[in-house]
Image (cartoon, helix red, strand yellow):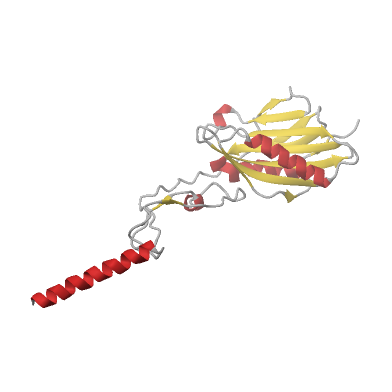
Amino acid sequence: MKKHVMLCVLALALTLCVFAAAQAEGGQVSPLDNLPTAEPTQFSYNPASEEDGAAVAAAAPVNRIYAGATPIPIDPIDMPTPTPRPELTFTFGEYVSTKLGLTFKSAVGYEINENISGKYILTEPAAAVKDNYPCTITLEISGITKTYTANDLKNDLARFLENEGASYTTWETYKAASKKLMNGTGYYNNYRGVLADGTIVRGRVHMAIISDSQRLTLHISCPGWFNSSYMKIYDAIHSSIKALPQE
């Protein structure tokens, strides 16, 4: 019996010596020795997708907890599920900007600001504001030269978005896509930003060459969780905007 115990002790000692030698030579270490407890999930957010609904909850960054020798992600069972926002409905009416020489249809009741040269700004009335962020629509006409190209337009769109993003703690854009505006060559891009107070903002910037000397910019900014609703306003403007008849 004593001889058997001694043999077991010697075998264990020999195993420990071999394991120590493997470590010294850069061999494998038991997975239990360096078991991760949490790891941030990397994700790529596509601002073209909607903020509304539970799909974003699955894409949001969360801490992952691992168990066992093989890393297997375990999501907390009490992860919060965002409450879907109700769809908004709007009544549309005609707006006329004599300074810009444009007319279009948009949600009625918005406050009009024409005090900035070259711009026509609509702001959602306070009684209708959602998530403490009013929807704002800006139409702007800028002068261009006859040599201005579609590539110049794309570059200006990128610069516009870069400047816009400076106001946010988190800023994400998608990929610019071609789309006409007032029958002119144009590009648009969607964005998603998070303000310092955590407010999520979504928006779209659409630029187009509408004449040999004019570029039009249509920018709509809205509370992110109602983005799909406010994009109906963009659609109404895009489909109805036109130049005022020349007198």
User: Of residues 118 and 76, which is closer to you in this image?
Assistant: 76
Whether residue 29 is situated above or below residue 4 in the rendered picture: above
| Residue at 48% from the left image edge and 46% from the top image edge | 84
Q: Position of residue 64 (x, y in %)?
A: 41, 53
Q: Residue furthest top?
A: 115
- Tell me where residue 217 sits by quadrant: top right
Relative to residue 173, is residue 102 drawn left or right?
Answer: right
Task: Give percent across and percent down for residue 202.
Answer: 60, 41
Location of the C terminus (image quadrant): top right
Q: How many marks?
A: 0
In this view of the protein, can residue 121 be seen by the observer? yes
Please name whichever residue, 195 or 214, is drawn nearer the observer in this view of the structure: 195
Quadrant of the snapshot with the N terminus: bottom left
Q: Is residue 93 left or right of residue 58?
A: right
Residues 62 and 26: in front is 26
Q: Residue furthest left?
A: 1
- Could you say where residue 7 lies in the image, as x and y percent from the top left? 17, 75
Q: Is residue 11 left or right of residue 196?
A: left
Q: Residue at x 81, y 27 (%)?
A: 99
* Residue 88 visible in this rendered orientation of the protein: no
Q: Name the residue: 50% across, 32% down.
A: 197
Indicate the position of residue 27 as horizontal and vertical percent values.
40, 65
Indicate whether 3 appears above or below 193.
below
* Quarter of the figure with residue 72: bottom left
